[in-house]
Image (spheres, rainbow, N blue to C red):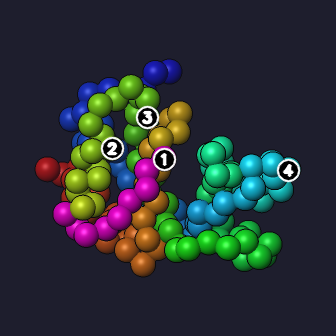
Amino acid sequence: MSGETNLETLIRTMKPALDPNEYVFACLPARDWAAATDLKPLSLFQEEEGLTLIIAKQEADRHGIDYAGVFGRITLTVHSSLEAVGLTAAVAAQLTRAGISANVVAAYYHDHIFVPRDAAERALRALVELTQT
């Protein structure tokens, strides 16, 4: 399944959903793959400086892992193509208008928007509003 590429359709049908869990971005040394997978990361990305993980705040706290900021995850439930053009820009522009920072992760089926936890409900409302324009 290749996913939707039409921007109007993507925006109209993206159905943003807020995950009730809290997430953090953390970094481990590049050689710590075993430790990283033990943390059950939602996402893991190899960077030059180390392994960036998106993990549940509860896991980070339990293992004493440093992080800066707590995030909520909003999933755009539409199956967007990895080749779709403009969805990330439209979402970022809408959240910018609302004064909310966003960290976007594109996975195979869906886009996931990580926003400051204290702004998550407001971000969700802004994205729902975008679907109605």
Q: Label 4 sits on what residue type?
A: Ala
Q: Is residue 100 magenta?
A: yes
Q: Is residue 82 magenta?
A: no
- Nearer the N terminus, badge 4 or badge 2? 4
Q: Which mark is residue 88?
A: 2
Q: Secondary structure at mark 3?
A: loop
Q: Label 1 sits on what residue type?
A: Val
The residue drawn where x is 35% and y is 64% is 101
Q: Is residue 6 left or right of residue 116?
A: left
Say which of 56 and 129 sits in front: 56
Q: Which mark is residue 20?
A: none
Q: Label 3 sits on what residue type?
A: His
Q: Between marks 3 and 4, how big is the CA–CA gap?
A: 31 Å
Residue that label 4 marks: 34
**Location of residue 44 in the rendering, given as x and y in whole percent from the top left corner:** 66, 48
Q: Is residue 89 left or right of residue 2?
A: left
The residue drawn where x is 46% and y is 73% is 117
- Nearer the N terminus, badge 2 or badge 3? 3
Residue segment shown in magenta = 97-105
Q: Label 2 sits on what residue type?
A: Thr
Say which of 127 and 37 sits in front: 37
Q: Which mark is residue 79?
A: 3
